[in-house]
Image (tube, coloured by chain):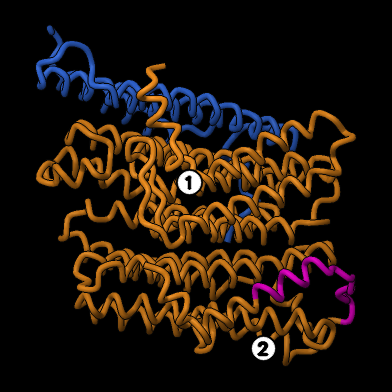
Chain colours: A blue, B orange
Amino acid sequence: MSVPSEHLFVLAAVLFAIGAAGFFLRRNLIVVLMCVELMLNAANLSFLAASRMHALAAGSPGLSLEGPTFAIFVIVVAAIEAAVGLALVIALYRNRQTVSLDALTDLKD
Amino acid sequence: MNPDIAQRILSQATLDASGPFLALALGVLVLVFLELLPALAALRQIVFLGSLAAAAWAATRTLFGPEIAAFEGTYVANSTTSWWALLFVASALIAWIFGRRYYRDEARFEGEHDILLLTAASGMVLMAGSRDLLVFFVGLETLSVPLYALSGFRRARRESVEAGLKYFVLGAFAAAIYLMGAALLYAGTGTIALAGFQERSELLETPLALTGLALIAASLFFKISVFPFHLWVPDVYQGAPSPVTTFMATGTKAAAFAFLLPLSFALPPESAGLVAAIALITMAAGNLGALVQTDMKRLLAYSGVAHAGTMLLALAGMHADPESGGASQAVLFYMAAYTFTAGGAFGLLTMLETQGGRPVTIDGLRGLARQRPGVAAALALFMLSLGGIPATGGFLGKYLVFSVAVRADMIAAAVVGVLISVVALGYYLRIIVAMYMQPEDATRPVPAESRPLSSAMALACAAMVLVLGVLPGWFLANVR
C-alpha cells in the first residue's frame, strides 16, 4: 500500500482539469473529443481510487465493488459516445470540408 | 449463476417494476430485426405503436400500487415514476405522429429514426425510476446518445448536422462533469445509492461530497436547460429536425426533473436560496431571449428555458414545503401540461414546415387564421397555455409551482416569478396577433394538405391542455 489515496485523487483532478482546459481552448473537433475522453478517464481513476480507499478503510483486501463497476460502464459509454461523435464529425466534414468548431456558426441569435 | 441471486433478480416484482422499460427495449430489438428484411418494413409502425402501448399498459399496472423496488433497490416503480413513464410515452407518440411525412430526402432511413426515438424513450423511463447514480447514468446516456444522432439526422443539411454536433459536444462535456461528480460523491460517502446517501447524510456535508453534488447538479441543470447552461438550447432546437425538437423539448427536461426530485433531498438546505435565484435568472433569460426572436422554433426554445426555470422554483421550495410531495406533484403536473402544450405547438410547426417547405417564422404565420382556422385556433390555445392564461393547463401548473414557493416562505421569489411570467405574455400574444389581426403575405400562401393523423394529434393535445386546465381534480387527487 505504497501509494496514498490522495495522490490518486490529485492525479485524477489534474487530468480532469487538463481535459476541461483543452475542451474550452482547442478548436479541432477531434481534439475536443480526445479531451472529453481524458475527462471521462479522470473520472474512472477517481472511481477506482475511491473504491480502493473505502476498501482500505474497511480493512478488506481488494476493492469495494461500486467503483470498478461504474468504471466499466463508463468505458462502454465512452465507446458509444465516440462512435456517434465521430459519425457527426464525418457528416460535418462532408457538409463543409472542415472539422473545426469555428465552422459551427449557422445557428446563432 | 447462484440460484438465490437469479431468483431475487428474476422475480415477478422485478418484472412489474421494469415493465415499461422492458416493453420499450423489446420494441427496439424487434425494430432492429425488422430492418434486416425489407419485406418486413410494413410491420414497423405496428411494432413501434405496439411497443409504446405495451409500455403504457405496464406503467398503469404500477400506477396506484405500493412502491416496488427492483434490482437491489437501484430501480423503483411507484405512482410517480409510472406517471412519468406515461408522460414519456405520450411525448414519443406526439413526436412520432407529427414526424410522419416530415422526412423527404431521409425517408428511407425512417426505420433508424424510429429505433433511435424508442431507445431514447427507454432511457427516459430508466432515468425516472433510477435510485442509484450508475443506473441513472446509463439511462441518461441511453437517452442522450440517440438524441445526438437524431439532432443530426438530416445529415445533408448544414443546420441539422451543426445542431447535432453542438448538442453532442456539450452533452459529452456534461456527462464527464456528471461522472466526476459521481466519483467524488462516492469517494466522500462510500455509496452510489440514493438510499445510502440518506443513511449517511452527515457525510454529505464533507467538502468532497459537496463538490460532487455541485458537479452532478451542474450537469443535470445542463439537461433541463437552466441558466447559465441554457445557451445550447436555441441553437439545437432550431437546427434539429422539428419532430426531434418536439421530443427533446418535452421528454428530456421531464426525465432530468424526474431524477432531480428524488435526488434533491441530498442538496443542503442552505442551497435553496441559490436554486431559487438560478430559477429566477433562468426565467428572465429565457423570456428576454424569446422577446427578440423571429424564428418560431427558436422562440419556443427560449420559452422552454423560461419554463424550466419556473419548475426549478418548485425544487427550490421543496425543502421547506410543509406539504410532503407538493413540489413533486407541482413539477409533474407542470411537466404534463407543458408536454401537451409544447408538444402540440412544436407539432403544428412541424406540420406547417412540412407543408410550406421552409422554417416557420412569426411573419410567416400572418393571416393564418383565415387560411387555416383550425391550425391557428389550436396554436393560439397552446400559446395561451404557455403564457399561463386561466382555464389552460399551463395556468394551473404555474399556480401549483408558485404556491409551493409561497408555502416555503419564498414569497419574494414567487412575486418576481409571476412578474417575469407576465413579460412572457408579450411574445406569446405577438404570435396570436400575427395570426388573427395581420393580413397574410399573398406571395407566400400556406398550402393546405389533409393530414388526418397530425390533425387528430393536435386536437388530442389541445383537449388535454383544456382538460388539465378545467378539470384537474382527478389528476391532482391521484398524483402524489
Q: Report the magenta residues as a range.
A: B442-461
Percent position of residue B297, x then y: 64, 65
* Callouts 2 and 1 in the same chain: yes
| Residue found at x 44% / y 65% | B308
Between B251 and B477, the residue placed more toward the observer is B477
Q: Quadrant of the N terminus of chain B?
A: top left
Q: Examine the structure image and report whether residue B444 is included in the region drawn in magenta.
A: yes
Tell whether B212 sits left or right of B130.
left
Task: Tell me what residue is drawn at x 37 percent, y 33 percent.
Answer: A21
Residue at image location 45% in from the left, 71% down from the top: B333
Q: Is residue A70 above or below residue B50?
A: above
Residue B433 numbered mark, or none:
2
Q: Position of residue B39 (x, y in %)?
A: 90, 35
Q: Is residue B314 left or right of residue B321?
A: right
What amino acid is found at the position of numbered circle 1 in the picture? Asp
**How far apart in space, not on screen, are marks 2 and 1 (Cα)?**
50 Å
Which mark is first along the chain, 1 or 2? 1
